[in-house]
């Protein structure tokens, strides 16, 4: 017997060589990607998350922030504040004996009145430090303070995502002279005056300096989460203490009014600056999101920089450090090797290898994820001690080596599977013959030799194992060569159940044969597999089978009639209990449903209701009422079913529908219902048939679908707060006079909100809940002129809603009135105008925060 080439290949190979090679390849790829900065954004996001997870530190008591906010600007006459106000502020602060006063306000030009007073203070005060801008578009320092050397630049270093994670302590100017930053100048002045500490250089080659207990090591631009980053000047990682609440703050109005005790600022660092959002350039820190409402102020960032330097020098508070390049490679290598060990250990278990492929991959993925959490945990703990360890590169290396090792082990098992396949073929009770692409016999199993002997199969072309003559079954006609399974398989065709007779030395042997081609990657036939068996005994059984078939025919006819009746009953039942509802419960037939069966699922719930239905129905008889409701409902149902939804129940004239495929299906169905209603209203032009108006509310959330009832009567229902909220959203359409409202949950589940005409209507309080829900109007089905007007005024309308909710009622009312001029009869505008007027008249109709309760 010939052996197949694929069965003689070594299964194991050099396992350890492959493992080492996979680790090296993954490590090289990870190091190259990390050097190119491909992991920067993820590393920065992790770095920021560490700050937000870190327990709050004790407030900084050595630093006092004198803030200028929006209220201060309104009382002081707007921005810029005059030199006289600044001079008075500094004079009052100096009277409390602070150690240093940092003026974090540009004063390159005088702002009258009071310029002479401010200049005199700058000439006489020994501890007043000003700011200027050095990099980019420079802003000159105050001339007097510049002559005295009491200035520092206020430039910040931003990463590519706009956040400030590095503190710039010094930078050369245009003449290549090293200039100190504002934070460094204030800190060094304070430490020298109060503690007689001086900055000393301990390693000139690496620019390492010491200040008290602090040891400063500059960034080189390739540390931890950074790839090739500009590290000009003397930069360090900023170990933020926190946001504004971590510092003592005093309003400038309190300072001007001398509402300070004589020793309130004694020996303190005082920083003066603005925190007004209208004046701030967006400054983002690790504590910030990219939303401008979370932007920090320059004063708070400078306070953090000063606190970092002073705290490190006096208290030994950790300065954030990083590991060197070779240490980072070693750190990544540890987790790359861990990925190999996890995969090898897990996939090498014999018991585990018997599991299904899906389960094996799930176990492997879950184990790698669990292992990948270890470098994150270690990195976070190190961060608490002042070290920043990268986590993205180790995790990528862990998963890379883990998956590559898993692939290698799976490939090894494939080789083992090939050898087992040979044993399997030998054990099969049918003859198997494998032909080469030229028709010669490549392999024949033991059963093939037992059936045919040492000869080939019909259609093969082997000089050693010659094929016997073949005939059409039960005849003397030769079987066409081109129709034999072997020949067709060699031509790339599959053939099944071909019955033919072969001549074995004058004895006819009936065979049933199958053929299948084996293709290469290029699509060429490389092998043909022929399976065959002796069917002599089966032919004898065919006659008996034919007789039994005739007897069963009559029984099958009776069964078909019974099945047809069952189908009719099932279709009738589906008109009362939707097939979709049964499908969600896991049933195929209504007869399988049991009491109490329920399933949890996230779905979109649609409620619709006819406006003023009571008054419409009063003028109709009972029969007219039923005809009217059925005419309306029959038009609404296709809009729901065509958009992958189903009607759960009719509640009089109201409809409750469910959508399991997504929120977009529910919104499209609602728009289609309104379009259909518009066409229906065209038929209601006769007197006494006023046009119909409906309200539709949609919410998306988790709900329970199930059965309720008793022993003799069941019903299907859905139970959830999400259903109640959908009903209440529909109720809001009456208040706002809008035909279609959706909840915040539905809005967030839409694939692309730009596909719809949507505007924010309100943020309401759910009755019995502490949470607040935003509701949105979808006005795609409005008349064209109204839709255009709402779309053009959408920005102004939503801005007015925002002003209303931040209690700027006068400004909100003006914007709503402007919108109402453009959108004639817009009920939401009218509602908000009425609310604004009521609030301004101090008539408490709504809740204390001016929000409606749903």
Image: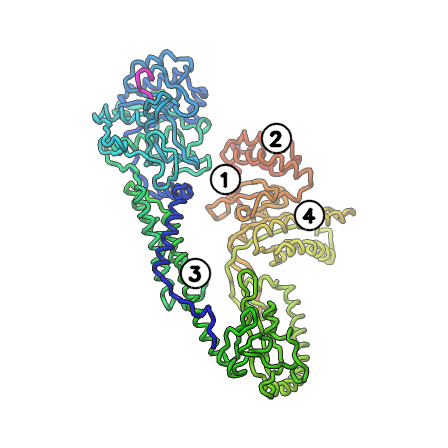
Please name whichever residue, 633 or 512, is drawn nearer the observer in this view of the structure. Answer: 512
Closer to the observer: label 4 or label 2?
4
Pointer 4: residues within 10 angstroms few (<14), some, or many (20+)? some
Dot 2: what SS? Answer: helix
Q: Position of residue 641 (x, y in %)?
A: 64, 57
Closer to the observer: label 4 or label 1?
4
Whole-number angstrom distance, CA of label 3 to CA of label 1: 54 Å
Q: Is residue 436 left or right of residue 545?
A: left
Dot 4: what SS? Answer: helix
If you read the primary sequence from the N terminus, does the residue marked by circle 3 or circle 1 appear first?
3
Q: How is the image coloured?
A: rainbow
Closer to the observer: label 2 or label 1?
2
Q: Which residues are magenta?
A: 146-151
The residue where tag 4 is placed is: 675
* Identity of the residue drawn at 58% across and 55% down: 659
If you read the primary sequence from the N terminus, does the residue marked by circle 4 or circle 2 appear first?
4
What is the residue that sits farthest to the right in this orientation?
A: 686
Q: Is residue 762 visible?
A: yes
If you read the primary sequence from the N terminus, does the residue marked by circle 2 or circle 1 appear first?
2
Question: Are dots 2 and 1 in contact, CB under 8 Å?
Answer: no
Closer to the observer: label 3 or label 1?
3
Pointer 2: residues within 10 angstroms few (<14), some, or many (20+)? some
If you read the primary sequence from the N terminus, does the residue marked by circle 2 or circle 3 appear first?
3
The residue where tag 1 is placed is: 847
The residue where tag 2 is placed is: 818
The residue where tag 3 is placed is: 361
């Amino acid at each position: 017997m010939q052996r197949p080439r694929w069965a003689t290949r070594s299964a194991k190979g050099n396992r350890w060589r492959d493992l080492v090679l996979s680790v090296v390849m993954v490590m090289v790829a990870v190091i190259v990607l990390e050097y190119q900065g491909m992991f920067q954004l993820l590393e920065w996001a992790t770095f920021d998350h560490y700050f937000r997870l870190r327990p709050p530190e004790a407030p900084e008591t050595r630093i006092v922030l004198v803030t200028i906010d929006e209220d201060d600007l309104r009382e002081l006459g707007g921005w810029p504040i005059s030199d006289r106000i600044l001079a008075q502020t500094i004079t009052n602060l100096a009277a409390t004996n602070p150690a240093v006063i940092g003026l974090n306000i540009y004063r390159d030009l005088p702002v009258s009145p009071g310029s002479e007073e401010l200049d005199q203070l700058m000439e006489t005060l020994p501890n007043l430090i000003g700011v200027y801008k050095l990099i980019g578009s420079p802003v000159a320092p105050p001339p007097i303070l510049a002559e005295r050397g009491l200035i520092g630049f206020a430039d910040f270093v931003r990463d590519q995502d706009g956040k400030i994670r590095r503190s710039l302590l010094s930078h050369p100017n245009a003449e290549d002279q090293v200039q100190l930053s504002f934070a460094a100048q204030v800190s060094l002045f304070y430490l020298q005056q109060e503690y007689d500490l001086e900055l000393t250089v301990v390693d000139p080659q690496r620019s390492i300096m010491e200040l008290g207990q602090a040891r400063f090591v500059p960034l080189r631009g390739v540390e931890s989460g950074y790839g090739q980053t500009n590290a000009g000047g003397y930069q360090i990682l900023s170990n933020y203490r926190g946001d504004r609440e971590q510092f003592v703050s005093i309003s400038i109005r309190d300072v001007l009014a001398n509402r300070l005790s004589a020793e309130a600022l004694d020996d303190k660092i005082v920083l003066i600056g603005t925190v007004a959002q209208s004046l701030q350039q967006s400054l983002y820190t690790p504590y910030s999101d990219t939303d401008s409402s979370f932007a920090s102020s320059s004063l708070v960032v400078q306070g953090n920089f000063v606190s970092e330097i002073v705290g490190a020098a006096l208290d030994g508070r950790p300065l954030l450090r990083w590991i060197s390049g070779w240490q980072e490679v070693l750190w990544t290598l540890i987790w790359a090797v861990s990925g190999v060990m996890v995969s090898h250990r897990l996939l090498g278990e014999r018991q585990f290898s018997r599991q299904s492929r899906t389960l094996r991959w799930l176990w492997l993925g879950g184990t790698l994820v669990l292992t990948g959490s270890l470098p994150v945990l270690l990195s976070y703990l190190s961060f608490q001690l002042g070290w920043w360890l990268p986590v993205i590169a180790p995790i990528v290396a862990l998963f890379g080596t883990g998956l590559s090792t898993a692939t290698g082990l799976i490939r090894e098992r494939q080789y083992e599977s090939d050898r087992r396949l040979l044993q399997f073929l030998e054990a099969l009770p049918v003859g198997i013959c494998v032909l080469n692409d030229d028709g010669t016999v490549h392999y024949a199993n033991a059963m093939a030799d037992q059936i045919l002997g040492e000869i080939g199969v019909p259609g093969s072309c082997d000089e050693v194992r010659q094929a016997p003559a073949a005939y059409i079954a039960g005849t003397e006609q030769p079987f066409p060569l081109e129709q034999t399974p072997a020949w067709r398989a060699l031509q790339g065709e599959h053939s099944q159940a071909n019955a033919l007779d072969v001549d074995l030395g004058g004895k006819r042997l009936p065979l049933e044969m199958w053929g299948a081609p084996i293709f290469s990657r290029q699509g060429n036939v490389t092998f043909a597999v022929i399976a065959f068996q002796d069917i002599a005994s089966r032919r004898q059984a065919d006659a008996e089978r034919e007789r039994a078939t005739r007897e069963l025919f009559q029984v099958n006819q009776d069964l078909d009639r019974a099945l047809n009746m069952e189908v009719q009953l099932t279709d009738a039942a589906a008109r009362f209990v939707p097939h979709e509802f049964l499908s969600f419960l896991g049933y195929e037939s209504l007869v399988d449903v049991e009491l109490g069966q329920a399933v949890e699922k996230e779905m979109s719930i649609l409620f619709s209701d006819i406006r003023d239905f009571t008054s419409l129905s009063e003028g109709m008889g009972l029969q007219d009422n039923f005809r009217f409701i059925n005419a309306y409902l029959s038009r609404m149902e296709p809009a729901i079913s065509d958009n992958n939804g189903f009607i759960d129940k009719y509640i009089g004239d109201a409809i409750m529908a469910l959508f399991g495929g997504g929120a977009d299906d529910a919104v499209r169905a609602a728009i289609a219902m309104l379009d259909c209603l518009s066409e229906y209203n065209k038929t209601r032009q006769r007197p006494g048939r006023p046009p119909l108006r409906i309200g539709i509310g949609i919410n998306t959330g988790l709900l329970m679908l199930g059965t309720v009832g008793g022993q003799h009567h069941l019903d299907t229902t859905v139970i959830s707060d999400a259903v109640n909220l959908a009903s209440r959203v529909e109720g809001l359409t009456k208040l706002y006079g809008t035909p279609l409202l959706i909840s915040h949950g539905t809005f967030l589940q839409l694939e692309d909100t730009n596909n719809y005409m949507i505007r924010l209507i309100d943020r309401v309080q759910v009755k019995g809940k502490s949470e607040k829900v935003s509701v949105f109007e979808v006005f795609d089905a409005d008349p064209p002129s109204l839709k255009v007007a709402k779309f053009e005024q959408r920005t102004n309308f939503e801005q007015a809603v925002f002003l209303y909710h931040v209690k700027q009622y006068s400004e909100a009312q003006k914007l709503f009135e402007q919108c109402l001029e453009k959108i004639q009869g817009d009920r939401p505008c009218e509602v908000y105008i009425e609310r604004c007027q009521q609030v301004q008249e101090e008539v408490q109709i709504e809740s204390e925060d001016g929000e409606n309760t749903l």
